[in-house]
Amino acid sequence: MSKDSLTITDNRTGKTYEVPITYGTYERDGASIRSADLRQIKVQDEDFGLMGYDPAYLNTASCKSSVTYIDGDKGILRYRGYPIEQLAEKSTYLETAYLLLNGELPSSNELEGWEQTIASHGMIHESIRNFLDGFRWGSHTMGMLVSVLGAKSTFYPDARNMSSQELMELHISRLVSKVATVAAFCYRHSRGLPYIYPDASLGFAENFLNMLFNTPNTKYEPNPALVKALEVLFILHADHEQNCSASTMRGIGSSLADPYSATAGAAGALYGPLHGGANEAVLVMLQEIGDVKNVPEYIERVKRREVLLQGFGHRVYKNYDPRASIIKETADEVFEVTGRNPLIDIAKELERIALEDDFFVSRKLYPNVDFYSGIIYQAMGLPVDMYPVLFAIPRTAGWLAQWKEMMNDDEQKIARPRQVYTGYDTRDYVTMGDR
Ligand code: CMC
């Protein structure tokens, strides 16, 4: 009997089965059995066989992936093996996106080519302006983004048949680039402002800020410190392995739907307040608390389960989210330019009390990426409804890295979970008069 196996005894039948255990890069957190190996465990030959029941995928690996590694107990996050702290300090968003999508850091020629490619794809079809006109003034920008990303699929019929790696790369470049233009246009429309077209001479974050804040009658020049801060925030948000939206991207992509439709679906998953919408929810929470003196009462409400402490807790991290530490440092750099956002004091007091309170300590609840990001965005003049959109822009690179990996993975098939049926056994139709 192999050491790397599991012996299972079915007490219903007394039969014993041996199931192989396989590993990923690490033995300590990558050991798994194939759920399909459980199917041989039956009482009678005609039985379907044993399944794993795992609502919300608490303990199910849906793929093998080499993109992003998280050790939730130690608070470690790495893209393609590189620690997030080093990438945040030394890389740019586009270089990190290249790394996620291609597996290696680019050479200087590769980086230059990639930056030019992304800059060259920045324009979007003029019909999108008409499409945006259909949204009423003041529409939530994330709802608009989800719709426009889906609509983009109609502009690229060839994306419905990913017949070559080159075609895949072309649509990946388009999406990484155009998501920023679409996001900025959604903002401009929702505020009734004229659209500012992308400027290929500017870097990714600088161009985005320009499309958001420039106006035809004044010259806007983004502060370099704010551009740098946005680059860091984009790097931190670029990927996070098999989260709700990445799994949605893979799930939709697994039916061979085009990547625009899959990205729209992933953005829809991100919109929820338990996922990328949490940064918006944190800001609303901090504004509602209003003053440091009200923090203890809010904590009591959380403990009475009347409200959530938004921006706290994580399915995988049972330690400080490393992204939250970096964002906290970035906040100070941003405040030097913009002036201090007083909400930071409320956030720090919430964190201080929560990290000492047994309710949070015993459940290993720590600040996550969304806890401090909104405070920075607000200081930078970015409106609250744009916060999930700001998450979606860089996460598009991560979604596409996950999608590309899935498309090239021979083990993947259309995603199709099983269920445990708990409804009626067969019964006869009852006519209306007899009900
Ligand atoms: N405030 C109060 N209690 C919480 C919180 C919170 N933010 N998060 C978890 N808990 C409690 C939860 O009630 C449960 O308690 P008990 O065991 O007594 O029933 C325990 O902690 C375990 O939580 P869970 O709900 O089983 O954890 P989960 O892995 O299903 O959910 C989560 C993870 C992120 C959805 C959740 O922590 C949450 O709702 N947090 C607030 C929203 C948020 O900040 N989301 C952003 C997540 S990070 C970025 C991203 O994914 O986009």
Image (cartoon, rainbow, N blue to C red):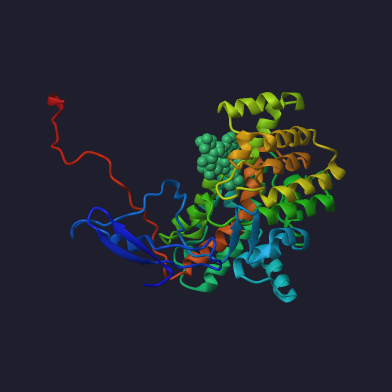
Q: Assign the N terminus to one quadrant of the image.
A: bottom left
Q: Which image quadrant for residue 360? A: top right
Quarter of the picture for ligand 1? Answer: top right
Instruction: Give the percent coordinates (x, y) of residue 325.
Output: 73, 49
The reply, left or right, for residue 261 in relation to residue 351 is left
| Front position in the image: 396 or 86 | 86
The reply, left or right, for residue 139 in relation to residue 12 is right
Task: Note whether residue 405 is visible.
Answer: yes
Instruction: Give the percent coordinates (x, y) of residue 15.
Output: 25, 61
Q: Assign the C terminus to one quadrant of the image.
A: top left
Above or below for 151 versus 191: below
Task: Note whether residue 277 is visible.
Answer: no
| Front position in the image: 391 or 358 | 358
Above or below for 163 versus 255: below
Q: Which image quadrant for residue 352? A: top right
| Front position in the image: 277 or 168 | 277
Instruction: Give the percent coordinates (x, y) of residue 56.
Output: 45, 47
Instruction: Give the percent coordinates (x, y) of residue 150.
Output: 51, 51
The reply, left or right, for residue 150 in relation to residue 36 is right
Above or below for 242 versus 218: below
Q: Residue at x 48, y 70 (%)?
A: 408
Q: Residue at x 78, y 42 (%)?
A: 380
